Image: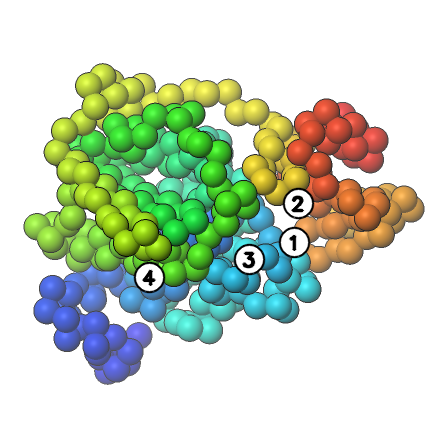
Amino acid sequence: MNQEEQLERYSRQMLFAPIGKEGQEALSKKSVLIVGVGALGTVLANHLVRAGVGLVRLADRDYVEKSNLQRQMLFDEDDVLAATPKAIAAKQKLERINSSIEIEAYVTDVTKDTLPALMDGIDIVLDGTDNFRTRFLLNDMAFQARVPFAYGGAVSSRGMSALFIPGQTPCLRCFINQGAGDGQTCDTIGVISPVVDIVASYQVVEVLKYLVDDRKALRRTLKSFDIWGNHQFDLKMDRPKENCPTCQKREYPALSDEEDHITTLCGRETVQIHTGQELNLETWSERLSKVAEVKKTPFLLRAHLSSEEKLVLFPDGRVLVQGTEDVSRAKSIFNQYIGG
């Protein structure tokens, strides 16, 4: 983008003194990773792409469903009909918004094995996820790599956000114990879209401050609020938790945990099973079409086994067994149609 085009596209942002021309040039050279391209992730990506961050990398394992449209701002009904993976659908929309930056999309399960490559060359990691297992993984990997981690969470009408910077602030584990969640998710108690926008906006503004090197303006708190109940609270991040395994002892528990190849997706009647090997969708389409109603896209394969149960296969080896949260039942269906 030449100087004239930059002045036109980012003129209002550059008029904002803390960013200015120098800050805009800095943003154009930065790279960010957004893990999770759902409610939070689409808002995060929208803001950062429009702001002119040079590289925006997206990672998500899921595809667009009708229930997403209430709050996931980059998707539409065509994406639902096509069962487009969220990362791909977001990339397609974002490239029409800003063609002058680089946008990468990865349809993958973010694990301790896949995350290092996703973080390669990244200046900051943003949390667009919906579960603490992945958040603790991002927290531990970011602190090990000495890369800032912008945490955000939204459920019901409540939200939380914080920017954790290795060597300068405590980490997520200093404030939230692993396994201490109450099981409340968007799929079990719902969420209203304004809280999503607010949380993501809080995340992005701290990220922009960091990327343009306005460190004195950073908010050194973990902010929590309830927009329906009309209250908010800021918890100072001045003191790490004694013997924190991540930012104090540098043990990084999430990086040493054994990955379970079977995961129950809470509240969605879905069990994910990772085969450990790539799946040829064309081959599986031929096999499963004999016993199920099959729909194949370039990114995934859906096989309807009954009115309640179906399989969703991804090229990276993941299989979603939908219609049950019973792991034993999911294994049985998996073994029956895919094999052990």
Q: Point out residue 46 in the picture as x, y percentages from the top left corner.
A: 39, 64
Which residue has dot 4 on it? 48
Q: Residues within 10 Å of mark 2 (few under 14, many from 20)?
A: many
Which residue is painted at 17% across and 73% down in the image?
14
Residue type at mark 3 is Asn
Distance from the alpha carbon under mark 3 to that under mark 1: 18 Å
Q: Judge depth for marks 3 and 2 and give the one in front.
A: 3
Label 2: which secondary element: loop
- Can residue 195 be seen in this snapshot? yes
Q: Is residue 139 left or right of residue 193?
A: left
Which residue has dot 1 on it? 299
Which residue has dot 2 on it? 314
The relative height of residue 273 versus residue 86 in the rendered view (above or below) is above
Q: Circles 2 and 1: CB distance less than 8 Å?
A: yes
Q: Which mark is residue 27?
A: none
Q: Point out residue 125 in the picture as x, y percentages from the top left corner.
A: 33, 45
Q: Judge depth for marks 1 and 4 and give the one in front.
A: 4
Distance from the alpha carbon under mark 3 to that under mark 4: 21 Å
Q: Earlier in the sequence, mark 3 or mark 2?
A: 3
**Quadrant location, the N terminus:** bottom left
Q: Earlier in the sequence, mark 3 or mark 1?
A: 3
Q: Earlier in the sequence, mark 4 or mark 2?
A: 4
Label 1: which secondary element: loop
Residue type at mark 4 is Leu
Residue type at mark 2 is Phe
Q: Residues within 10 Å of mark 1 (few under 14, many from 20)?
A: some
